[in-house]
Amino acid sequence: MSDAIKHECGIAFLRLLKPLEYYKEKYGSSFYGVQKMYLLMEKQHNRGQDGAGLASIKLDVNPGERYISRVRSNDSQPIKDIFSQINERISTELEENPEYLNNVALQKEKIPYIGELFLGHVRYGTFGKNSIESVHPFLRQNNWMHRNLIVAGNFNMTNVKELFQDLVNLGQHPKELADTVTVMEKIGHFLDDEVTGLYQDCKNEGFSKKDASSIIAERLNIPRILERASRNWDGGYAMAGLLGHGDSFVMRDPAGIRPAFYYKDDEIVVVASERPVIQTVFNVPFDAVQELEPGNAIIVKKNGDVSINEIRTPLEKKACSFERIYFSRGSDSEIYKERKELGKLVFPSVLKSINNDTDNTVFSFIPNTAETSFYGMVEAANDFLNQRKIQSILESKDGLSEEKLQEILSVKLRSEKVAIKDAKLRTFITEDSSRDDLVAHVYDVTYGVVKPTDNLVIIDDSIVRGTTLKQSIIKMMDRLNPKKIVVVSSAPQIRFPDCYGIDMAKLEGLVAFKAALELLKERDLYHIVDEVYLKSKAQESFKDADVVNYVNEIYAPFTDEEISAKISQMLKPEDTKAEVEIIYQNVENLHKACPKNLGDWYFTGDYPTAGGNRVVNRAFMNFYEGKNARAY
Ligand SMILES: NC(=O)CC[C@H](N)C(=O)O
């Protein structure tokens, strides 16, 4: 990926179902949980580097003993930072108290993080700043065990302002605007309600205050709490929570926009944002890890009962295709195949662009995430080459000599590693403006593999703003003096903002949008922009469900190819010697390649929740009015 869009999060949930002694016995350590959490989080570091946090709960502790621990960091290497803090804490305790060493009960009683329930999070912020206060998990503390709530999520709500207002209308006074606090307070409100109701029941049934506590824990209806809390959530989410006494949950949005996978056996229940993470950390096969269905929650009661509950009626499943194209790790067996397929399916357009001249073409990719689609493209290219060889053999079969056959078969595809990623850059949503300056230095090139008579085909997974292409990659490629540079995007043109967790909240940054505007100007159609504005403006007071995405009309007069051609022109740096062409996947092929992740709103404007149409409407008005603001 050449553009910097990394705004995702990863969740890691772990419940140990056996007593800690069991893990000590079997795996040699009562720190089993912490160790697994480290792996679960480290294997998801691709999903978030703004911050990381972990919370743990010890079950069945005596009053007066601490049972919740939490650590968070927004250090430059946050996962490393939190685990060195945890490590230090544990080591110090063990050093100072050698009697803890082989005594699991004492360890549990005295050492933080030695518990049965864990929630970890790696963060790329989509809301607010990168302050330590914004790092998950969030904590809502209370003297009543059940009312303690710990929340972390991979999510973005389109209506967080309304949700905040709802709380205020309830008479609450949230101390922060952070979206996670809003969501947590929403859950917390109904948790309180549930606990109060149950307490009342217990009282009516004649239980003492003290006895009521464990009965409340047993009866606590988590599905009901989640159902009530999530009623107005409009967005993409995988929300995870722990309650002080030991119940826990992970819930996924009704359209399945954000991912969540789980695995359970008689020792553990684990949930993570990506499947191979669980496979690797617990050494379990692909089929053993299940996808949490949209609108469902996995609930683990304190007593270890695990259930999957439908909380919200699932909508048409629109799992984010960007997870497959770019965000998630390509080590997932399905994702790997899908990325290869994307490379294969886009190849016919590449052939057209190079006039079928594979002999004078060097194929390459932009590291690292586009590498897999590159393998797919190369396979398709080899198939093409084989067809050509068969053709030549058949044509000359009468006079075929060994020499001739050698000559035909010796033709090989030229695939090379041309672009090298030099520096790993960390970007923040708050630093949009300084990004351009940094990107020029991210890539370097391999000299000596491209001839002046060559086409240079380079595949990237997607092109969002095109800034890096223009400012770094194409310039660098041109230094190799190819005849033509063909940049291939394994994803379709990104035409609409995202509002479910990806950092594409503004229309004017998108190169496809800019290209459409240029074309409108050139063809004297710019009045469409004014018309779309008036239609958008007129919808401002509409309910979300009634808002229509008129931004489609900006693109409607043009074919995909026309927009691609304009983008090629726009992203070609001024003094480039080579011809430059940019080729995109089409949406149909995307769906063919990633059949389970049909969420494609950034390409099609087809938003899976009503709030999406409001966001695109707002984004367009922001652009038109010259407001540099996020649309949600
Ligand atoms: N990428 C995410 O899932 C972000 C979670 C949440 N919206 C935050 O900013 O903290």
Image: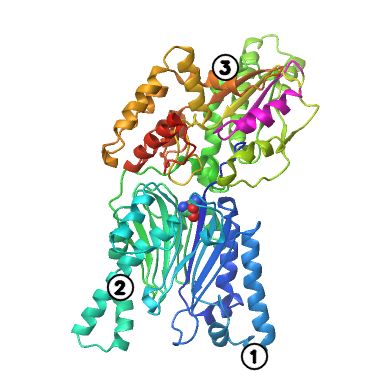
Which tag, 1 or 2, sits closer to the chain's start? 1
Is residue 250 in view? no
Quick one: SS at disc 2?
loop
The amino acid on which the numbered mark 2 sits, given as a three-letter code, is: Leu
Say above or below: 501 vs 487.
below
Q: Say whether residue 17 is left or right of residue 339.
A: left
Dot 3 crowding, Cα within 10 Å, few <14, some 14–19, many 20+: few
Quick one: SS at disc 3?
helix
Give the spatial CA distance, label 1 vs label 2: 38 Å
For the residues bearing labels 1 and 2, Cβ distance under 8 angstroms: no
Residue under pointer 3: 352
Give the spatial CA distance, label 2 vs label 3: 62 Å
Which tag, 2 or 3, sits closer to the chain's start? 2
Is residue 266 in view? yes
The answer to whether residue 464 is magenta is: yes
Residue under pointer 1: 99
Which tag, 3 or 1, sits closer to the chain's start? 1
In which quadrant is the C terminus drawn? Answer: top left
Residue at point 28% right, 71% down? 194
In which quadrant is the N terminus drawn? Answer: top right
The amino acid on which the numbered mark 1 sits, given as a three-letter code, is: Glu
The answer to whether residue 95 is magenta is: no
- Of 249 and 408, the residue lying toward us: 249
Say above or below: 534 vs 302.
above
